Image (cartoon, helix red, strand yellow):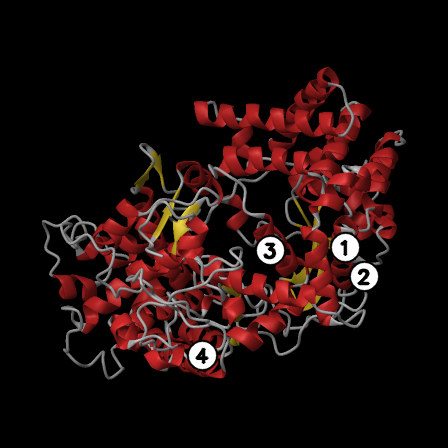
């Protein structure tokens, strides 16, 4: 099956069947048409040609030996095409650092282009994706692994209430589109009828409070989490809500693209109402009213930049005193209706709730009810019949993100199971795909970087001794979570049946809500994770003072147990350093070693830090994306500080390895050059214009080109490795380089 034979179906060309027991990363780039059929089930891929009953003249050996695979090609008899790995994309990446490079570009002018330019040029974003590259390919591979687990589990017979029964039946119910189609929007008719019966503002608030799976939806952004000024205890917290578009400026910008989004939004609202029984003229009128209402709500919203200030977004109130903030909202009654009892709540954005009080009092009751109806329908759309799902994708997928076609159903439902029952599915994932050796190696890397970070803090010339002592205390007390939780979530009260996808989702939501509500006023459980084990991501949590690396990201291209140190330290090492640095970025630095929002800086040191951070803001403000659209240096400040600091820490840690202290070249590159190439190629990502336009508005991360070029332009070690001169575009004079951590 030649992969370059375009006559073959795309999925066939890319198929790698984990269900057949093939768990190694195969790179099949040479094929022989004359190969006899070989059964893959049970093959030892560390073996020889005789193990698959193929003659030696039918086998090729190449660079694949470094993966422990002597067979460069295998004739695969495909009998299930749904378990798909994007194998060719993986193969291009596994060709070492050389693959995908644009060696015609000057590394000293645009290192992103040099490291990945040919890959960007030759890569097409799959129709069902908003972008493509490192995170996407690993995400797809993990998804395929989860799919295989779910398919196998769903076919088995399991005891009711068991882990296997719940994930298997949940998956089956989501894949049963025939039953879902027959139901149409029947699952939400009862909720819509309750909205129809509402008479006034108080009715609306009381009904919102009683929605067991999502109380306060539409009007109240509500969650339970650590009290930032008393981080040992959980608190009920409220944030701004009420908008369907990504952020407030989408309601006010007058450029053509934003106007297009607003028109598409009205079409989406209209479609949902028509699908749920409203005539076309009335549906259009409702859509106009909802957009007008949300525009009014948007006036009170804080911008994404303003939301980055922890102090301004922490406002603690006695529940009984909230009437002083919003005379028309009975908070005591609202909280009681939710089944909670708490003396205090935290309001992130009080101005929003002041405005909401007035809006609920001034708007016609029917408009408010339409807003609630839309919230119910849109919130449920992904669980309803095909027409609802298509309408939702048309707006949120196509218009906002540029995605051409929706993901395959198996992907959607696999994601749903991971999102809803992540700790059940995660147990099976790590058992099968996260070996102890990977965890041991990660422990070593994290500890190495932590040691280096401590030494760098001690050497800082801009920070005084008292502030250094507090910084070191915070760093040394980092809670490090790697791979998967020590204690998995309990889903005992979740009822899962095989033939009711919507009811299953509601049961999962209600269980999660019950779990959260039980935490209010109680001590924080720091064993909890904020992501499932298969997630391709990592995070720093300031109130836990923890760094977390799920098993999902601890795989190629971020982490390869067989790769040289230069590649691993440049890739996962920089990710580790990035998350560590979040504890000391412009936001994380406001939390002390206990996770408390409390100033631990001397005034002099705080001022020096702010001046250094301002250099970062100015640098990234000058980066241009999509013609005249610029990176928002204030919005992306925390991530940029983490990128710059994380890479510097990873480099110093790498220099303490045997390879880091040598000068031996691999593929023609020195160890230092390989380190920087490993870092750059981790950010080998290509995004659609629509996605990028939205990201610039709301995403605190810079576009990938600048996640590469930005940090490198500030590193003297990069200058030395590639010979950067003052005439080169990557060059910055010493006085304009950002150096904080």
Residue indicated by mark 4: 438
Camera-near label (1 vs 4) is 1
Q: Is residue 282 above or below residue 509?
A: above
Distance from Cα at disc 3 to Cα at disc 2: 19 Å
Among numbered discs 3 and 2, the one appearing first in the sequence: 3
Secondary element at tag 3 = helix
Residue indicated by mark 3: 415
Contact (Cβ within 8 Å) of mark 2 with mark 1: yes
Nearest the eye: 204 or 8: 8
Secondary element at tag 1 = helix
Secondary element at tag 4 = helix
Residue 94 position in % (x across, y down):
31, 65
Q: Residue at x 41, y 82 (%)?
A: 444
Distance from Cα at disc 1 to Cα at disc 4: 35 Å
Camera-near label (4 vs 3) is 3
Among numbered discs 2 and 1, the one appearing first in the sequence: 2
Q: Residues within 10 Å of mark 1 (few under 14, many from 20)?
A: many
Residue indicated by mark 2: 495
Residue 334 position in % (x across, y down):
84, 46
Q: Determine which quarter of the picture holds residue 298.
A: top right
Residue indicated by mark 1: 504
The quadrant of the image that shows the N terminus is bottom left
Q: Residues within 10 Å of mark 4 (few under 14, many from 20)?
A: some
């Amino acid at each position: 099956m030649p992969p370059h034979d375009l006559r073959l179906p795309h999925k066939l060309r890319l198929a790698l069947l984990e269900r057949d027991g093939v768990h190694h990363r195969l790179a099949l780039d040479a094929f022989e048409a004359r190969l006899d059929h070989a059964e893959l089930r049970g093959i030892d891929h560390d073996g020889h040609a005789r193990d698959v009953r193929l003659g030696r003249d039918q086998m090729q050996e190449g660079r694949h030996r470094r993966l422990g695979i002597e067979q460069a090609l295998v004739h695969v008899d495909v009998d299930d095409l749904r378990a798909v790995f994007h194998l060719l994309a993986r193969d291009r990446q596994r060709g070492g650092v050389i693959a995908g490079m644009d060696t015609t570009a000057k590394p000293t002018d645009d290192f992103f282009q040099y490291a990945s330019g040919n890959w960007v040029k030759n890569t097409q974003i799959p129709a069902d994706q908003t972008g493509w590259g490192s995170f996407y390919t690993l995400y797809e591979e993990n998804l395929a692994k989860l799919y295989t687990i779910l398919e196998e589990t769903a076919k088995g017979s399991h005891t009711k209430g068991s882990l296997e029964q719940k994930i298997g039946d949940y998956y089956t119910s989501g894949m049963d589109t025939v039953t879902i189609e027959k139901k149409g929007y029947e699952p939400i008719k009862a909720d819509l009828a309750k909205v129809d019966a509402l008479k006034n503002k108080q009715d609306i608030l009381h009904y919102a409070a009683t929605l067991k799976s999502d109380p306060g939806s539409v009007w109240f952004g509500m969650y339970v989490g650590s009290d930032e000024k008393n981080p040992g205890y959980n608190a009920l917290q409220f944030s701004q809500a009420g908008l369907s578009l990504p952020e407030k400026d989408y309601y006010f910008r007058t450029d053509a693209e934003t106007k297009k989004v607003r028109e598409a939004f009205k079409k989406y609202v209209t479609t949902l109402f028509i699908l749920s029984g409203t005539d076309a003229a009335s549906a259009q009128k409702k859509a106009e009213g909802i957009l007008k209402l949300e525009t009014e709500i948007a006036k009170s919203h804080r911008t994404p930049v303003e939301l980055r200030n922890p102090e301004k977004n922490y406002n603690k109130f006695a529940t009984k005193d909230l009437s002083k903030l919003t005379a028309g909202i009975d908070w005591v009654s609202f909280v009681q209706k939710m089944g909670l009892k708490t003396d205090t709540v935290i309001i992130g954005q009080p101005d929003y709730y002041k405005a909401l009080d007035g809006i609920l009092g001034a708007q016609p009751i029917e408009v408010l009810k339409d807003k609630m109806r839309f919230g119910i329908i849109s919130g449920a759309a992904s669980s309803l019949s095909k027409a609802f799902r298509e309408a939702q994708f048309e707006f949120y997928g196509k218009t906002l993100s540029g995605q051409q076609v929706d993901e395959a159903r198996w992907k959607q439902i696999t994601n749903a199971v991971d999102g809803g029952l992540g700790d059940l599915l995660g147990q099976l994932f790590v058992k099968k795909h996260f070996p102890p050796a990977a965890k041991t190696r990660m422990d070593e890397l994290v500890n190495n970087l932590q040691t280096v970070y401590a030494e760098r803090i001690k050497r800082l010339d801009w920070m005084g001794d008292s502030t250094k002592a507090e910084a070191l205390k915070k760093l040394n007390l980092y809670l490090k979570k790697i791979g998967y939780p020590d204690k998995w979530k309990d889903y005992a009260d979740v009822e899962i049946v095989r033939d009711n996808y919507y009811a299953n989702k509601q049961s999962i939501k209600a269980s999660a809500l019950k779990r959260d509500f039980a935490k209010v006023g109680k001590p924080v459980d720091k064993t909890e994770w904020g992501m499932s084990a298969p997630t391709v991501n990592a995070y720093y949590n300031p109130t836990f003072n923890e760094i977390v690396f799920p098993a999902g990201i601890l795989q190629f291209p971020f982490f390869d147990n067989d790769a040289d140190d230069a590649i691993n330290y440049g890739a996962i090492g920089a990710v580790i350093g990035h998350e560590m640095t979040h504890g000391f970025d412009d936001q994380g630095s406001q939390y002390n070693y206990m996770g408390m929002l409390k100033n631990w800086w001397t005034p002099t040191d705080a001022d020096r830090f702010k001046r250094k951070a301002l250099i970062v803001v100015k640098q990234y403000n000058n980066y241009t994306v999509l013609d005249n659209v610029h990176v928002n240096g204030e919005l992306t400040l925390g991530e940029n500080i983490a990128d710059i600091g994380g890479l510097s820490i990873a480099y110093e840690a790498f220099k303490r390895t045997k390879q880091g202290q040598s000068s031996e070249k691999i593929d023609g590159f020195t160890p230092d050059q390989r380190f920087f190439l490993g870092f750059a190629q981790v950010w080998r990502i290509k995004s659609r214009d629509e996605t990028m336009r939205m990201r610039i508005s709301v995403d605190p991360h810079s576009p990938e080109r600048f996640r590469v070029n930005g940090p490198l332009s500030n590193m003297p070690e990069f200058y030395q490795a590639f010979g950067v001169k003052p005439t080169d575009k990557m060059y910055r004079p010493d006085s304009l380089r950002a150096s904080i951590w």
